Amino acid sequence: MIRPALAVLVIDENRIRASIIEAGLREAGHQQVTVIHDVTGIARRIAEIEPDVIVIDLENPNRDMLENMFQLSRAVKRPIAMFVDRSDQASIEAAVDAGVSAYVVDGLRQERVKPILDMAVSRFNAFSRMARELEEARSELESRKVIDRAKGILMKSRGLTEEAAYTLLRKTAMNQNRKIGDIAQSLVTAAGLLRPAEDE
């Protein structure tokens, strides 16, 4: 659930619509609400304000306006709820690709602001967690490949078994208080530098 301590930034050129969003947020207990009506220099303003969540309301967005907001979404790495009056399939897909957490078409009503914001934060957190897990899995796979190459180098150069090569890598890592993947990478790099020129 959303905590009232969240700082929320509302971006809306239409003051009446912005007041609807602000009222919905304040009614839901959010006191740290900043409203911006002018999108000029918006990236700089976001950096200054450092909001936890961003709500963007675009009354009748054109392609350029949407693309600018999607670029902003990719850059800020925060939960974003975007309200638009009308949309098409391409815009919806572009919003998803840009990482917009909630893209709401023709749904700007005061009582809907809080649940939509809650959903945007939850979806953003879930997506961030998945992205982090994917990166960790990729890193782990890359590390295993490097360790396998390092074991191969030790087996060939020292005549060790695979198990003995791994034991040597692990012992060296422990002695140097480093990760085994780092030791393996150093060995692979050194072996590449020591390789005779005709092998290149």
Image: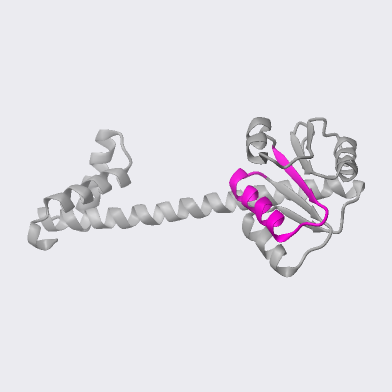
At 80% from the left edge and 44% from the top edge, which residue is drawn?
12
**What is the x, y in percent for residue 101?**
70, 52
> Vertical placement of 17 versus 137: above or below?
above
In this view of the protein, which residue sits in the foreground, 120 or 174?
120
> Vertical placement of 101 versus 182: above or below?
below
Q: Is residue 43 magenta?
A: no
- 196 to the left or right of 26: left
Q: Quadrant of the C terminus?
A: bottom left
At 78% from the left edge and 46% from the top edge, which residue is drawn?
118
In this view of the protein, which residue sits in the foreground, 178 or 2?
2
Q: Quadrant of the N terminus?
A: top right
**What is the x, y in percent for residue 147?**
29, 53
Q: Is residue 77 magenta?
A: yes
At 87% from the left edge and 56% from the top edge, which residue is drawn?
107
**What is the x, y in percent for residue 9?**
75, 38
In this view of the protein, which residue sits in the foreground, 14 or 46?
14
Span shown in magenta:
52-78
